[in-house]
Image (spheres, rainbow, N blue to C red):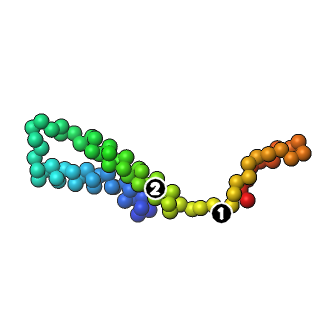
């Protein structure tokens, strides 16, 4: 497993540990929910969006253009990159 993969795997656990430390330092109000489900789900959604943006920005680019499938002389020519 690469360092990047390991970091992405451990990130939710680190965020949750940080949340536990914050909660231990500042006790919650009696009317608040003890489950951090909404916060963790929001963090996960944000990380997914950031990952997709990073992949779109930093990902490999193709330098050609796509030629769609077409008929030539009654034969189907598959689509390809030029």
- As helix, strand or loop, the secondary structure at mark 2 comes to helix
- Expressed as whole percent of the image width and height from the top left, the position of residue 21 reads 17, 53
31 to 82, vertically: above or below: above
Q: Quadrant of the N terminus?
A: bottom left
Name the residue at 42% across, 58% down. Answer: 5
Q: Does residue 43 appear left or right of residue 32 in this picture? A: right
Residue 1 visible:
no
Residue 44 visible:
yes
Name the residue at 88% across, 42% down. Answer: 74
Q: Which residue is mark 2?
A: 53
Query: Neighbour class for label 1 at 10 Å: few (<14), some, many (≥20)?
Result: few
Name the residue at 37% across, 46% down. Answer: 45
73 to 56, vertically: above or below: above
The part of the image, by quadrant, that contains residue 31 is top left
How far apart are the two marked residues, 2 and 1, measured between alpha carbons?
20 Å
The part of the image, by quadrant, that contains residue 61 is bottom right
Q: Which mark is residue 2?
A: none
Q: Quadrant of the C terminus?
A: bottom right
Query: Neighbour class for label 2 at 10 Å: few (<14), some, many (≥20)?
Result: few
Name the residue at 46% across, 53% down. Answer: 52
- Work out whether mark 2 precedes mark 1 in sequence or the reverse, and give the earlier one: 2
- Expressed as whole percent of the image width and height from the top left, the position of residue 59 reads 53, 60
Q: Which residue is mark 1?
A: 63
- As helix, strand or loop, the secondary structure at mark 1 comes to loop
Q: Does residue 21 appear left or right of residue 71 in this picture? A: left
The reply to whether the C-beta atoms of the residues labelled 2 and 1 are less than 8 Å apart is no
Q: Count the marks: how many?
A: 2
- Expressed as whole percent of the image width and height from the top left, the position of residue 79 reads 74, 49
């Amino acid at each position: 497993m690469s360092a990047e993969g390991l970091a992405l795997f451990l990130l939710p656990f680190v965020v949750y540990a940080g949340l536990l430390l914050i909660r231990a330092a500042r006790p919650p109000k009696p009317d608040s929910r003890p489950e951090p489900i909404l916060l963790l789900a929001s963090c996960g959604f944000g990380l997914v969006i950031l990952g997709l943006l990073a992949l779109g920005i930093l990902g490999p680019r193709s330098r050609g253009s796509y030629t769609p499938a077409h008929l030539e002389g009654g034969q189907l020519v598959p689509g390809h990159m030029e």
